[in-house]
């Protein structure tokens, strides 16, 4: 028990961020100020310091995301796990809602009939939301691919992309699709990511919008 650190439950998150800050300093990593809380929350969620190197932001991404949130943008996730992780109370305080269409019976039926993934149909449905939308993709690279293809065919351009799907098949290539577009994004390059990371990034932005 000599190595156990006793921390009050309400102080655990604060202590975790102190440790993260110290570890980053040891690695001689200085995060850009506007990105710091987001990257640290991704690290906090995963205990993986690679995010300090691979989490990639388009120019002015944080400012644009905060503006969207404050103007009442909705958030669309590609998994119910991601949906459950988003702080919907804070989002609602700005007039936004969180959605996930993946489990809808009509989505599953259409995907089967067309021979495409539910993620593809879900993204198509999301583009009909009549307000700005932040897409938080943590699982399905096909969701990113579908959004990109729809945009290339002259469809609606996503207002913001959080692109952090995890895995091996098409994951890296799907993330790279948006790197050179004019769509604002926060993307984790490489194979790592996940619904928990997508939700963590959403929440970091929501807390920043609330606290500032």
Image (cartoon, grey):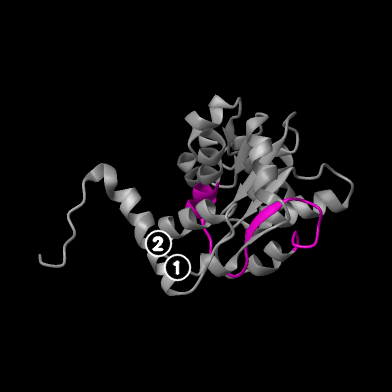
Q: Nearer the viewer, residue 40 or 185?
A: 40
Q: Is residue 140 above or below residue 106?
A: below
Q: Quadrant of the N terminus?
A: bottom left
Residue reaching furthest to the right: 154
x and y percentages locating residue 173 in the rendered image: 70, 68
x and y percentages locating residue 188 in the rendered image: 60, 62
Q: Is residue 109 visible?
A: no
Residue underneath mark 2: 20
Q: Is residue 54 visible?
A: yes
The quarter holding residue 69 reads top right
x and y percentages locating residue 128 in the rendered image: 75, 33
x and y percentages locating residue 31 in the rendered image: 55, 62
- The secondary element bearing badge 1 is classed as helix
Q: Nearer the viewer, residue 203 or 112?
A: 203
Cβ atoms at labels 1 and 2 below 8 Å apart? yes
Q: Quadrant of the C terminus?
A: top right
Residue underneath mark 1: 24
Marks 1 and 2, how far apart at CA: 6 Å
Q: Is residue 65 found left or right of 40 in the rendered image?
A: right
Q: Tell me, yes or no, whether the highlighted magenta stretch contains residue 11.
A: no
- The secondary element bearing badge 2 is classed as helix
Q: Nearer the viewer, residue 29 or 129?
A: 29
| Residue found at x 31% / y 53% | 15
What number is the disc on residue 66? none
Q: Is residue 105 above or below residue 36?
A: above
Q: Is residue 177 found left or right of 170 in the rendered image?
A: right
| Residue found at x 80% / y 45% | 157
| Residue found at x 19% / y 59% | 5
The quarter holding residue 6 reads bottom left
Q: Which residues are magenta?
A: 177-201
Mark 1 Cα-neighbour bin, 10 Å: few <14, some 14–19, many ≥20: some
């Amino acid at each position: 028990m000599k190595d156990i650190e006793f921390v009050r439950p309400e102080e655990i998150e604060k202590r975790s961020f102190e440790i993260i800050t110290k570890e980053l300093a040891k690695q001689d990593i200085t995060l850009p100020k506007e990105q710091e809380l987001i990257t640290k929350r991704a690290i906090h969620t995963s205990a993986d310091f690679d995010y300090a190197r691979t989490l990639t932001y388009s120019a002015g991404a944080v400012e644009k995301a905060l503006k969207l949130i404050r103007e009442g943008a909705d958030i669309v996730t590609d998994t119910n796990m991601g949906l459950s992780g988003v702080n919907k109370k804070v989002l609602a305080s700005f007039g936004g809602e969180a959605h996930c269409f993946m489990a809808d019976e009509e989505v599953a039926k259409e995907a089967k009939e067309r021979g495409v993934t539910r993620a593809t149909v879900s993204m198509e449905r999301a583009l009909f939301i009549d307000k700005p939308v932040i897409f938080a993709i943590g699982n399905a690279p096909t969701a990113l691919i579908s959004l990109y293809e729809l945009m290339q065919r002259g469809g609606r351009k996503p207002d913001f992309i959080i692109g952090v799907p995890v895995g091996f098949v098409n994951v890296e290539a799907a993330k790279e699709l948006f790197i050179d577009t004019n769509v604002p994004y926060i993307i984790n390059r490489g194979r790592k990511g996940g619904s928990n990371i997508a939700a963590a990034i959403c929440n970091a932005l929501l807390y920043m919008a609330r606290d500032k």
